[in-house]
Amino acid sequence: MFAVVNDGARAQAADAETVKILALGDSLTAGYNLPPGDAFPVRLEAALRDRGHAVRVVNAGVSGDTTAGGLARLGWLLDGEAPDAVIVELGANDALRGLPPQKAEENLAAILQSLADRNIPTLLAGMYAPRNLGPEYIAAFDGLYPRLAERFDVPLYPFFLEGVALQDRYLLSDGLHPNAEGVQVMVDNILPHVEALVERARQTSG
């Protein structure tokens, strides 16, 4: 006798093998002023699938979000279908508003602690403060990401806008947000780090 597997069972099995990545961030993740298909999570999922990874990248980016906003909505994001891995990209709006780096660090620490408590592999994407905020603010803000990565033993991608910031050809007219080409540069640069995250997620779940 041969077992008959219906389409629903196949779909469930395939979904069980798919690594769900939650991209928790602000407008840089959300895809500010871009067509939906050009948002960072969509481009990242496509790049990972092109390299043979069975993944689903969920866009949990909210334009204007601060570290406090990300922390406030983390609970319900995790209470549903829990992700297998998380990319945390927050802090740019804290710096743009000149909010205290110490508070941003506290909020990100709370996020990382919640993910650690759930044993969810995490990649922390760092940001740099605007250079016009003064050396003390810059040192405090830029340094919080390496400190958190060491404290929580999570990998750090030092600068989410690596290769894109200050490059007009990769930015929208506001000079802050990536255009579609810029998003692709971001994806290409971070891809090896996310592939390592996917592998950690598989090891954790396996």
Image (tube, rainbow, N blue to C red):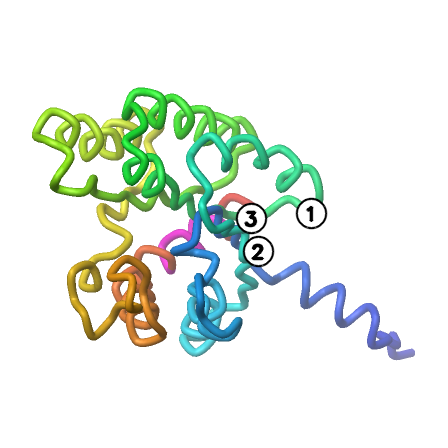
Q: Position of residue 104 (x, y in %)?
A: 35, 27
Q: Position of residue 202 (x, y in %)?
A: 51, 52
Q: Position of residue 5 (x, y in %)?
A: 84, 74
Q: Residue at x 63, y 42 (%)?
A: 77
Q: Position of residue 40 (x, y in %)?
A: 42, 64
Does dot 2 land on a helix, a strand or a loop? strand
- Write down the residue under mark 2: 20
Q: Quick one: label 3, few (<14), some, or many (20+) residues within 10 Å?
A: many
Cα distance in 3D space between marks 3 and 1: 9 Å
Relative to 11, 121 lies left or right: left
Secondary structure that dominates the magenta span? helix
Q: Quick one: label 1, few (<14), some, or many (20+) residues within 10 Å?
A: few
- Write down the residue under mark 1: 81
Give the amino acid type for the residue marked by disc 1 in the picture: Glu
Q: Quick one: label 2, few (<14), some, or many (20+) residues within 10 Å?
A: many
Looking at the figure, which quarter contains the N terminus? bottom right
Marks 2 and 1: CB-CB under 8 Å?
yes
Q: Residue at x 27, y 48 (%)?
A: 157
- First along the sequence among labels 2 and 1: 2
For residue 98, above or below residue 41: above
Near-viewer residue (30 or 33)? 33
Q: Residue at x 46, y 42 (%)?
A: 65
For residue 141, above or below residue 83: above
Q: Which residues are magenta?
A: 195-201
Give the amino acid type for the residue marked by disc 3 in the picture: Asp
For residue 131, above or below residue 183: above
Near-viewer residue (122 or 198)? 122
Q: Residue at x 25, y 64 (%)?
A: 189
For residue 89, above or below residue 174: above
Give the amino acid type for the residue marked by disc 2 in the picture: Lys
- Of all residues, the one furthest to the front in this rendering is 174
Q: Is residue 100 magenta?
A: no
